Amino acid sequence: MMKKELAAALLIPLLSMGIVGCSSNEGDDVTINVGGGNPTTPTDPTDPTDPSGGDCDRVIPADFVEFNDDCSVGTLSGVVDSDYTLTSDVQWRLADTVTVGNGNRNVANDADVQAIRDAGVTLTIEAGTDVRAFGAGSLLVTRGSMLMAEGTASSPITFSSLDADFEGLGEWGGVIIQGFAPQYGQGGTGPCFGSGTVCNVEGEGGTDISVYGGNDPADNSGVMRYVRIAEGGLVAGPNNEINGLTLQGVGHGTQLEYIQVHSNLDDGIEWFGGTVDLRYAVLTSNDDDDVDYDEGYRGNIQYVLIEKSQTADAPQGSNDPRGIEANSSDADYVPETEAVLANVTIMGGPLNNSADSDAGPQPGMRLRGALTTSIFNSAVSMFDTGCIRIDDADVNGDGSNIISSNVTLVNVLNDCRDGIYDKRDADSASNVQALTLTYDSAFAIQEPQAQLASAPTIVAVNNGSGFVFDQTDFVGAVDPNGEAWWQGWTLPGTVGGAEEVQPASFVSCNGENSVCTLSGLINEDYTLVAGVEWRLDGEVLVGEGNRSVANAADVQAVRDAGVTLTIRPGVHVRAFDTGSLLVTRGSKLNAVGSPAAPITFSSVADDDLDGEGEWGGVVIQGFAPQYGAGGTGACFGSGTVCNVQGEGGTVVGLYGGNDPADDSGTLRYVRIAEGGLVAGPNNEINGLTLQGVGHGTDLSYIQVHGNLDDGIEWFGGTVNIKYAVLTNNDDDDIDFDEGYRGNMQHIIVRKNPNKAAPTGSN
C-alpha cells in the first residue's frame, strides 16, 4: 500500500517531468520541473398569494405551505398531511414545528398502529434543496410517515437558520424522526411495550413532540443521505433540548449515511432506543455531545469524524461536551443498550477542557449505565481529563447494587493529557495505546500505528438489519491511503476550521495575517497554520540545544527546555536569501504533510521552484552519536556528552550525544527546493542536513530539488528514511558519513539532464 502511495504522490509526476502537489495558499498546483453550492441568500417573505401563473406554475399548493409573490420562497407550518416534495428551485422555510403525519398520538392496540401506518405521508426533499428555519422552527417526522431526503455529494440537502452563514448556535430547533422500533425504559424496566404490542413514549425535542415507539425493529422512516444540519439546538425547556438530529424509536428499515451536524447547541445526533444504523457522519463544533445513544438503542455505526470547536473557550449551553455519551447513569441504567462502533475519530477542543462546562472538563467518551459497547479502529485526542470514561450503574447510589457495563476496545489510539482512562479500564482491550496523534488535511492519522497489519473481525449487533461492517485495516474515520469521504459535501470551512496565527516575539505578520515572517529564536511551542505564507528571515533557530553541554545534567536541561515547531499540511515556507531553519538538539520539528497537501520549503525570490542556492536549507540536530575522522571513535568517548561543531551556516553551533533513539520529530510529505546557499569555505548548506539525528525521528516521503549542495546529508546519527526523491541537485544527492548507522529504502535520484556542468564547486 505504501508503494502505491509513493507512485501516486511522486513517481507519476516525475515521469512526466514534474513533481506536482497542492498549494493551499495559492489555490493552484505547484510543479517542480525536473527537466529544467452555496445556499441562496434568504429573501424576506411577502404576503402569501395563490401560487398560480408566472413562476408559480412550477409549485404545488397545499394548506401547510405559503409562497411569496414569485414563489421563490415557500414557508411550511403546521401538519404536512399529504405527500409533498420540496423542490430545489425554491427556498423552503420552517415557521414553527412542522409535523409530518399524525403518528405521534397515542395508540392502544394493533389496529391503532395500522391506522397510523395507513395514514402515513411522505415528505420528499430534492437534492440541493435549502431548508431554513425561523427561531421556533423544527421538522418532526412522526411514526408511520417518512422523510425521503436524498442529496448527493455535489448537491447536498441543507437545514439551517434564516441567515446566510452557518456560524450560529441554537438559532432554531432541529430534525426529529420518530418510529415504531423498540425503546427500553430506565431502571431496567424493559421494553416500553412490555408483553403487549404497542408503545407510547413521551419524546424530547419541543412541546409538540408527543409520543413514539413500538415493537417493530425493522420500521422504516425513510432515507437521509448527504444531509447537512447546522445552527440548531433551541432549548425547548428544562432537560428538553433539541438535538441536531433526534432519532426516537427509529427502525433499521431507515437509511442514514453522509450526515453532518454542525454547531448545534445540544447533541449532534441522539438515538432514543431504536435500531437504525449509520455510516459516514461528520459532527463539528457541537456544544454538547456529538454521538449519544441510550434507552435500549441496538445498532451499528461506522465512519464518524468528530471535531469540537477549536475557538470556543467553554460551552454556550448547560452542557458537558463529549465526543460520545452512551446510556444513562446509575438508577436510570438501561442494560438493553448495545452498540458496535468502528472507525471513529474524536478530536476535542478548549470547550471540553473548560472548568466552566456543566460538570467540569470532560473525557472524549463516557460509556455507562450497564450498556454493552464494542469500539474498533478508533482514535480520541485533545481531551485533557482522559480519553475514555467507563462507569458501571450504582443502582441505589450506595454501592450495594452495582450492575456492570461491558466495554470492549480493539485498536483504539489515544492522545489525552491525563492518559487513556478517566476511571476504570475496559473489560476487554486489544492494542489500546497512548501516543501523540497527528492528522493530515484529510484528517487521516499520520502515525504508523494507525495502519494495521491486518483487519480485525468486526461483528455487528444482530438487530435484524443485516448490517455488515467494512473490515478495515486502519484506525480512524479516514483511511490514510484512501480518499477524504467528507470532502466536497460538508459545509464549507466547518471541518478543520481555519486556525488563527498566534502572536509570538519571533513572528511578524502583515495586516491580514496572510504573510508572516519568522526570525531569530523560536523559544516556545509554535504552529505554522495553513492559509498563511510563512517566511524565514535569516537563520531561524528552534530551541537552544546547540550550546555546549558538559554533563548529563546539561543534556537533561536542554531536553527539558526543548520546543516543538509544528507545520500543518499544505503550508508553504519561503525563505529570504539568508534564510534557513535550524532545529537544535532537544527540540522537534513536526512537519507532517499528506499526498494531497505536502509541505513546501522554497525561496521568496520568485513563485517558481526552479532556482538554485536562493536560500539555505533545513538543518536538524540531535543527541545521537557522531564518530570522528581518522578512526578517533565516538565524540563522547567514554563519557556521556558530545559537542560537535556543525556545518550549515554561521549559527549552527553544536550537536551530538550518545542516544541512538533520540527523537527530533517527523518529516513526512515534505518538499525542499532551491536551497544550498554557501555559508563559507567548506560550509555549504544541504537541502536537508541531519546532524546526530536519532532513529526516534520519522523521515518519509521527502523531496529535495535544485539544491546547490547535497540533497540529504547525514553527519553520524541513526535516523532511517523511506521514500525519498532527489532531483536536479548540484552536488551529491545522498551523503552519509561520520559514523552514520542507518537504513534507507525506496529512493529516486535523478540528475538534471539539461545541465552540462555543476554550478558550484562540486
Image (spheres, rainbow, N blue to C red):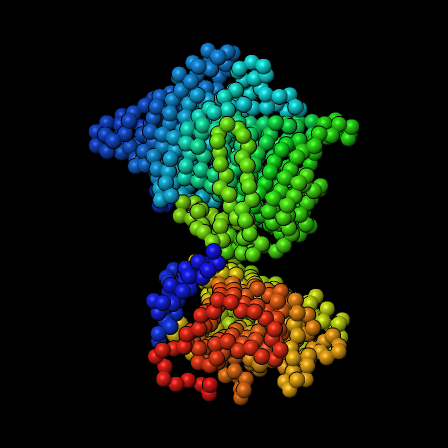
Q: Quadrant of residue 694?
A: bottom right
Left or right: where 203 falls relative to 706:
right
Above-or-below relation of 515 to 145? below
- Confirm whether residue 580 shows in the render: no
User: Which residue is at a point 37% across and 38% down the rendered structure image?
Assistant: 151
Location of residue 110 in the rendering, given as x and y in whole percent from the top left corner:
48, 12
Left or right: where 370 falls relative to 528:
right
Location of residue 297 in the rendering, given as x and y in whole percent from the top left corner:
56, 29
Left or right: where 318 falls relative to 177:
right
Nearer to the camera, 81 or 247: 247
User: Which residue is at a point 61% across and 80% down the rendered structure image?
Assistant: 738
Which residue of the protein is positioned furthest toward the left in this rendering?
Answer: 53
User: Which residue is at a point 41% across and 28% down the rendered structure image?
Assistant: 222
Above-or-below relation of 267 to 441? above
Q: Quadrant of residue 46?
A: top left
Above-or-below relation of 631 to 25? below
Left or right: where 49 falls relative to 632:
left
Nearer to the camera, 755 or 169: 755
Total labels: the figure holds 0
Location of residue 43 in the rendering, given as x and y in whole percent from the top left corner:
34, 38
User: Which residue is at a point 36% across and 29% down the rendered structure image?
Assistant: 124
- Confirm whether residue 392 shows in the render: yes
Location of residue 631 in the rendering, given as x and y in whole percent from the top left corner:
66, 84
Above-or-below relation of 463 to 414? above
Q: Quadrant of residue 122?
A: top left
